[in-house]
Image: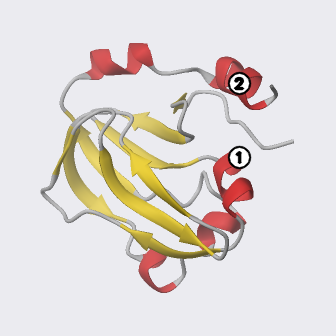
Amino acid sequence: MAKVIEGLYYTESHEYVRVEGEYGYIGITDYAQNELGNVVYVDMPEVDDELTAGEEFGAVESTKAASDLNSPVSGTVVEVNSALEDTPELINQDAYANWIVKVKLSDTAELDSLMDAKAYGEMCGK
């Protein structure tokens, strides 16, 4: 069973956002990394790029497949996890510790449309 962490917000396409103040850390869930298999490349946006909730902002490639990344929230990229450029497999080791981008949130009301841990866990359990 994939790990689901309380206090995060989840999308149906298996991204999460961890909110700390006015910032959100976006990554893929444990379920997603498990489905993908060995992650070999992470395509990330640039700092200062604008993300829009529900729209693609990058991709994760594994030995099995490539999967687009869809942003759970809108905001401005303030940091990318540069460790993933050289060591993308960190996502397989701990998907929640190894976020992909940090954004300054532009509309916290968007969080209301995302799933909590219980709803996401139920969706993955289907």
Drawn side of residue 82 relative to residue 78, left or right = right
Q: Position of residue 113 (x, y in %)?
A: 42, 15
Marker disc for residue 23: none
For residue 75, what is the image quadrant? top left
Q: Residues within 10 Å of mark 1 (few under 14, many from 20)?
A: some
> Circle 2 is placed at which residue position?
123
For residue 65, what is the image quadrant? bottom right
Q: Position of residue 2 (x, y in %)?
A: 79, 44
Residue found 33% across the figure and 65% down from its top: 44
Please determine whether, in this image, residue 78 is positioned above or below residue 38.
Answer: above
Please determine whether, in this image, residue 63 is positioned above or below residue 102.
Answer: below
Which image quarter is the N terminus in? top right
Q: Of all residues shown, which one is farthest toward the bottom?
A: 86
Residue found 22% across the figure and 23% down from its top: 107
Sequence-wise first label, 1 or 2: 1
Q: Residues within 10 Å of mark 2 (few under 14, many from 20)?
A: few
Give the amino acid type for the residue marked by disc 2 in the picture: Met
Please determine whether, in this image, residue 116 is positioned above or below residue 69.
Answer: above
What colour scheme does the image use? secondary structure
Identify the secondary structure beneath mark 2. helix
Give the amino acid type for the residue marked by disc 1 in the picture: Tyr
Identify the secondary structure beneath mark 1. helix
Q: Position of residue 101 (x, y in %)?
A: 36, 56
Residue found 47% across the figure and 38% down from its top: 18
Residue found 60% across the figure and 65% down from its top: 91
> Circle 1 is placed at which residue position?
31
Please determine whether, in this image, residue 21 is positioned above or below residue 118.
Answer: below
For residue 105, what is the image quadrant? top left
